[in-house]
Each structure stands twice: as structure tokens, then as C-alpha cells.
Amino acid sequence: MSERVEILGVKVDAVTMAQAVERVTDLICAGKPSIVATANAEMLLRATHDDELKNILNAANLVVPDGAGTVWAARHLGKFMPERVAGFDLVQELMKIAPARDIKFFLFGSAPGIADKAKLKAESLYPGIKIVGTRNGYFKPADEPEIISLIKNSRADILLAALGVPKQEKWLAKYKDELNIPVSIGVGGTFDVMAGVVKRAPLWMQKARLEWLFRAMLQPSRAGRLIALPKFVWNVHKQKKKTNP
Ligand code: UDP
């Protein structure tokens, strides 16, 4: 088991990418429905005023440090946090080992057609991978029973849910026992990037911890969400002062 670092009330696992992949494969072997969350600064800030999300994250089987902000916060609080484990990268690492280990995926979420495009991309990048089902993420409550049986009957090992934060975390927590899939992961915009409709930041920007800026430039509708970053930094400073006055 890894150390968990509390950031703004949410416990985040201090894991490397390799350890995160190993934890996910262990959860598949254990077979009980489990939840993996990818915590970036925006999600952690939201959890400070959304108790339902906070409780879901603290009950999750694994919470990986998604984003430079999360890694910075842990280190600023004087804790060990080995590296960033971005949700998108975690999905790619899991897909890479999937054919050899016979790990099956269900892709749930994003606009109509996107999960299918992400499936095709995965099949070309990771030959032999089994994507046993897809479903777009736009639905009414009345459609949920059909979606649940679709996912359940797929007998996937990993359910990737791309409904945005916090909808995906809440949906997975509500239905995980009914779905009976060993591992469910909320993956935000991952299918959009795989399908090629949204670009990932170039490597130099990721390394310079500027991925957030790239996303805001590309999707100006997201720019309003940038306010979360200074708020997050401010809240982490406050937490540090409280613990080390
Ligand atoms: N989405 C969805 N159903 C909804 C709302 C959003 O499937 O009711 C999808 C949306 O199409 C996008 C993803 O959820 O593919 C959210 O992506 P975003 O990059 O905004 O993720 P976040 O930053 O919230 O993790």
C-alpha cells in the first residue's frame, strides 16, 4: 500500500505510474467493484465545497495525482509525491498491457461517435486489445437501466467513464455495485483526445507544467475554469499554515 497525502481534505495516493498500473491490475484480480479517481487541482478544489465528491474520493480504492498542481501541493505540504500520473497516460499504459493480460475495456461517455473513434484508435495503437463496448455520455435518467445492463453484460474488466467531473465520479459511485465491473475510472476528456477532436498539449508544455494553459487556449469556453488554479494554490497555502503555523 502506498502513502496517502491529504490535500484539501482528499487523500491522494503517492504512487508512480508503474505502481498505479500494478494497483489497477491487482484490483482486477480481486474482482470486487472498485473505483479509481484521477485527482487534478480542479477536482480537489471542487471537493472542498462538494461533500458528496469528497466522500467518493476518500472511499475510492486508488486516487492518482493527475496534474502538476496535485504534485506541487503534496510537495508544498512537505509530503512525498513521486510523479504526476495523468489520467490520459494511465489509460494508455493500461491499454498497452491489456492484450497480453487479456484485460477488456468498456468506453462510456463523450459525444456520440467519440468513444467509437477512441476504440478504433486503441485498436490501431494496441493490436489485440479488446474493447467490448461503447456508449456515448449523453442520456436521460430513463436511459440508465439500459446503459447499466449494456455495461454489466459486457463483462469488461475496466470501465472508463468520460462524463466530466464530478458527474462521472458520482455516476460510478452510485452504480458500481450494480455494474459489477472490477475497476471503474473517471477519465474526463480522454476519449476526445484519443479520437483526435481535442489535442493534448505538446510535451514541452506538459513538462513546463503548462498543460492547463494549453487546454484553456484551445477551448476558450474552459478559460473561466482557470480561476480554480489560483484558488487551489491559495487553499493549499492555508492548509500548510494550519498544519505548520
Ligand atoms: N460529457 C458527457 N456527458 C455529459 C457531460 C460531458 O459525456 O453529460 C463528456 C464530454 O463530451 C467530454 C467529457 O465528458 O468528452 C468531459 O471532458 P472534460 O475535458 O471537460 O473533462 P474534465 O475536465 O471535467 O475532467
Image (spheres, rainbow, N blue to C red):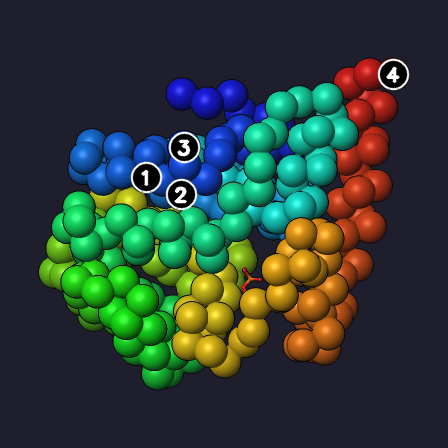
Q: CA distance from mark 4 to mark 3?
A: 34 Å
Task: Say whether mark 3 is within 8 Å of ligand 1.
Answer: no
Is label 4 in a helix, a strand or a loop?
Answer: loop
Is 26 on the left or on the right of 193, as rendered? Answer: left
Q: Disc 2 marks which residue?
A: 36
Q: Disc 1 marks which residue?
A: 24
Which quarter of the rendering shows the C terminus?
Answer: top right
Q: Disc 3 marks which residue?
A: 19
Q: Disc 4 marks which residue?
A: 245
- Residue at 73%, 53% (x, y): give it: 208
Residue type highlighted by circle 4: Pro
Say which of 5 and 48 sits in front: 5
Is label 2 in a helix, a strand or a loop?
Answer: strand
Q: Earlier in the sequence, mark 1 or mark 2?
A: 1
- Residue at 79%, 38% (x, y): give it: 235
Tell us which disc is closer to us: 1 or 2: 1
Q: CA distance from mark 1 to mark 4?
A: 38 Å
Tell us which disc is closer to us: 4 or 3: 3
Query: x%, y% of residue 45?
Result: 68, 46
- Residue at 50%, 80% (x, y): give it: 197
Q: Earlier in the sequence, mark 4 or mark 3?
A: 3
Q: Earlier in the sequence, mark 3 or mark 2?
A: 3
Q: Earlier in the sequence, mark 1 or mark 4?
A: 1
Query: x%, y% of residue 152?
Result: 17, 57
Q: CA distance from mark 3 to mark 2?
A: 13 Å
Q: Is residue 137 above or below residue 156?
A: below
Q: Are marks 1 and 2 in contact (CB under 8 Å)?
A: yes
Q: Is residue 171 above or below residue 85?
A: below
- Disc 2 crowd, CA 10 A, few/some/many (<14, 14-19, 20+): many
Which quarter of the rendering shows the N terminus?
Answer: top left
Is 87 on the left or on the right of 235, as rendered? Answer: left
- Residue at 38%, 78% (x, y): give it: 114
